[in-house]
Amino acid sequence: MNTQITCKSASQNSEANSTYIQPKFTVEKSENETRVFVELPGVSKDKLNLSVENRQIFLQTEGSAKRTESWEVLHRESKDQSFQLRLNLGQQVDQAAIEANLQDGMLTLTLPKAEAAKPRKISVE
């Protein structure tokens, strides 16, 4: 599958004075689809903004550590971070059929190959 995925780096938003960090991600390809696994520790679905436009997937989160008033943090492995990621998609991705699933801090994006881009058998008459 010749789906090309390129990434633009994270940026700093001067309006809100927020710094966004590019999350770690992995890309796996098969004959019919490409899957992107994005690590988003501590991010909930309501804090995740995900959109597709002009052959790009744009992901943005706002950090919000959950703190219970009666608990005191003694040790923390990961920071309360805001993430931003922009992936450029190739022409072969069916944008209307993209699926996203967020579970246990791992976002899985399924990017199916467009039917027109799939190999097909031609019958000879």
Image (cartoon, grey):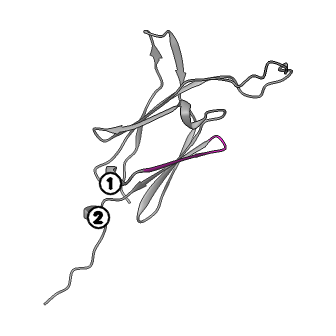
The residue closer to the viewer here, 69 or 52, is 69
Residue 45 is labelled as: none
Question: Going by the image, does 91 lie left or right of 58?
Answer: left
Name which quarter of the figure residue 51 lies in. top left
The residue closer to the viewer here, 1 or 76, is 76
Q: Is residue 108 magenta?
A: no
The percent position of residue 36, horizontal first and vertical second, equals: 50, 48
First of labels 2, 1 by sequence position: 1
Q: Which quadrant: the N terminus?
A: bottom left
In the rendered image, the vertical position of residue 19 relative to residue 118, given as above or below: above
Label 2's element?
A: helix
Residue 94 is labelled as: 1
Q: Which quadrant: the C terminus?
A: bottom left
Query: Residue most toward the left?
Result: 125
What's the amino acid at mark 2?
Glu
Q: Main secondary structure of the magenta part?
A: strand
Question: Going by the image, does 65 lie left or right of 89?
Answer: right
Label 1's element?
A: loop
Name which quarter of the figure residue 77 lies in. top right
Q: How many marks?
A: 2
Q: Who's the residue at 56% across and 37% down the image?
A: 45
> Which residues make up the magenta segment?
99-105
